[in-house]
Amino acid sequence: MLTVRQMRYFDALATTRHFGRAAEMVNVSQPALSAQIAELEKDLGVALFERNRAGALLTRQGEALLPEVQAILQSVDALYDRARQVTGILEGRLRLGIIPTVAPYLVPVLIPMLRARFPKLDIELRELLTSGCVDDVKAGRLDCAIVALPQSEETLDTLLLFRDRFLIATADDERTVLMSPMTEAQVDIDRLLLLEEGHCLRDQALSVCGASAGRRVANYGATSMATLLQMVSHGMGITLIPEIAVKEERGRSRMRIVPFAEPQPSRQIGLIWRGRSRRTADHRALAEVVIDASAELLG
């Protein structure tokens, strides 16, 4: 018998095209997801995916059915949203996306606050790049997301949460940084380490330092601030660090953090959600808690 759970698994696998990542996306084991996909294919009488070593590709039948399944899931989520409206603010499930350069620093402060203020909230977190957050909010796979602003999707509502200043992280003996505070023009682009393509912080760092997105810079495929800062502490270069990360990362050995001169460059972090969502009150309540949590990490 066709179930909503099976449809969510189908949507996750169609989105990721990888059984492991799809299982992680819906918080189940890979064998459990595979079994439910197989059961769904049996019930429908069609093969939805082509399996291979690289993952899974939608078949022609799968591509035809995917929009129908996504429409059903959006209707189900709308029903849940309506049910929450008659209960209270921030009760039940809320699926929140957060970009990787914010999540590891904000989440440990945010979650205890949410649990204390909204004990009936069942929050599900997903760490995604900004593009993934935007896509999943639009598609209804996330209720809202914390991303870097601005974002250009007209179908999404946006609420500014906080300003996150940039600083420079260098090795203790870095000779290319001689004074503090420093200006953007003093940043040695040839020594600048960046996150891999797709991270909004990469483009922001290039913009701050006056470099074009197409300029060749040191690129080691780093996917996290922690990796970049470890490289910095070993003298491999310098990088921009957002203020929200400073309290957690400043204790690294062989590394120092240098502020920029005024006006200090920064990024804006905001909350996005679907413009027609019935959970606007929930999103605004969540934003208030995020603002309070960020205040403990900034300034």
Image (tube, grey):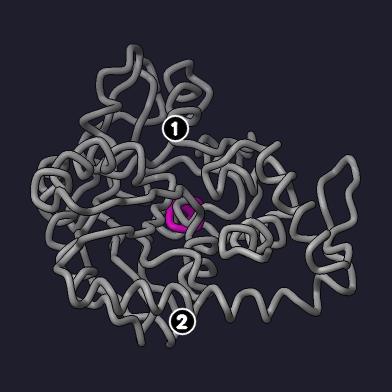
Q: Is residue 127 left or right of residue 249?
A: right
**What residue is rendered at 29% in x and 51% in y?**
122
Instruction: Find numbered disc 1 in the image and state the secondary structure of the residue it sits on.
Output: loop
| Foreground: disc 2 or disc 1 | 2
Image: 103 above or below 151? above
The image position of residue 65, as x and y in percent, is 76, 77
Furthest-top residue in view?
253
Tell which circle, 2 or 1, labels the residue nearer the N-terminal end: 2
Magenta stretch mostly in which secondary structure? Answer: helix
Closer to us: 155 or 84: 84
Say if the magenta span includes residue 85: no
Tag 2 secondary structure: loop
Under mark 1, the amino acid is Ile
Q: Is residue 204 magenta?
A: yes
The N terminus - image quarter: bottom right
Q: Residues within 10 Å of mark 2 (few under 14, many from 20)?
A: few
Neighbour tally class for label 1: few under 14, some 14-19, many 20 plus, Cα within 10 Å: many
Tell me the number on the disc at residue 153.
Answer: 2
